[in-house]
Image (cartoon, rainbow, N blue to C red):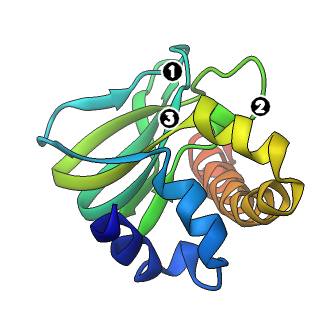
Amino acid sequence: MDDLTRILKGLPFFEGFADEHLALLVGCARNERATAGSFLFREGQDATTFYLIREGSVSLNIHAPGQGPLIVQTVSENEPLGWSWLFPPYTWHFDARVEQDARMVVFDGLCLRTKCDKDPVFGYELIKRFSRIMTQRIEALSFQLMDVYGERS
């Protein structure tokens, strides 16, 4: 657990988290690896986790009619991935494909939601941080859609 605490303290997403809140996060976390070409999750599947990419990269993809998969954003070192575990119906809205072999910290969503319910200060801090990520991803998706469906000269 000390290793995970040290890892989380060194990641920008968790900067400024109180030690007791880091302990709550660590209690729901594990280290994992994934190989290039594999999928962490697929659109429509149950969203039970979120990821913090430590090394490598993962692309978020949507399927555009007649276009095939489009990369909305690529998530790489020190970035979080996945917010669907936070909101019912807890299903993924994108595909997440590993582009480069990845090392990541994986967080159990049910474990975290339970801890957020018990400690609203912790929950609010986590929601604020994910809100920023959600905004960035929605903006990235908007740009992709403009490229696909916007006027072409």
Q: In the image, 20: left or right of 38?
A: right
Total labels: the figure holds 3
Task: Work out whether residue 27 or residue 100 is closer to the camera in this orientation and state it.
Answer: 27
| Label 2, label 3: how far apart the Cα atoms are | 12 Å
**Residue on which disc 1 sits:** 43
Other-residue count near label 1 (Cα within 10 Å), few / some / many at <14 / 14–19 / ≥20: some
Other-residue count near label 3 (Cα within 10 Å), few / some / many at <14 / 14–19 / ≥20: many
Task: Work out whether residue 141 or residue 31 is closer to the camera in this orientation and state it.
Answer: 31
Q: Tell me the residue at 77%/31% (across/down).
A: 87
**Residue on which disc 2 sits:** 87
Mark 1 or 2: the one toward you = 2
Task: Work out whether residue 25 or residue 1 is closer to the camera in this orientation and state it.
Answer: 1
Disc 1 residue type? Glu
Disc 3 residue type? Thr
Disc 2 residue type? Phe
Q: In the image, 39: left or right of 41?
A: left
Other-residue count near label 2 (Cα within 10 Å), few / some / many at <14 / 14–19 / ≥20: few
* Dot 1 or dot 2, earlier in sequence: 1
**Residue on which disc 3 sits:** 49
Residue 47 falls in which quadrant of the image?
A: top right
Q: In the image, 105: left or right of 44?
A: left
Is residue 7 shown to the viewer in this render? yes
| Label 1, label 2: how far apart the Cα atoms are | 15 Å
For mark 1, give the secondary structure: loop
- In percent of width and height, residue 150 lies at 68, 47
Quadrant housing the C terminus? bottom right
For mark 2, give the secondary structure: loop
Contact between marks 1 and 2 (CB within 8 A): the answer is: no
Q: Tell me the residue at 19%/53% (across/down).
A: 102
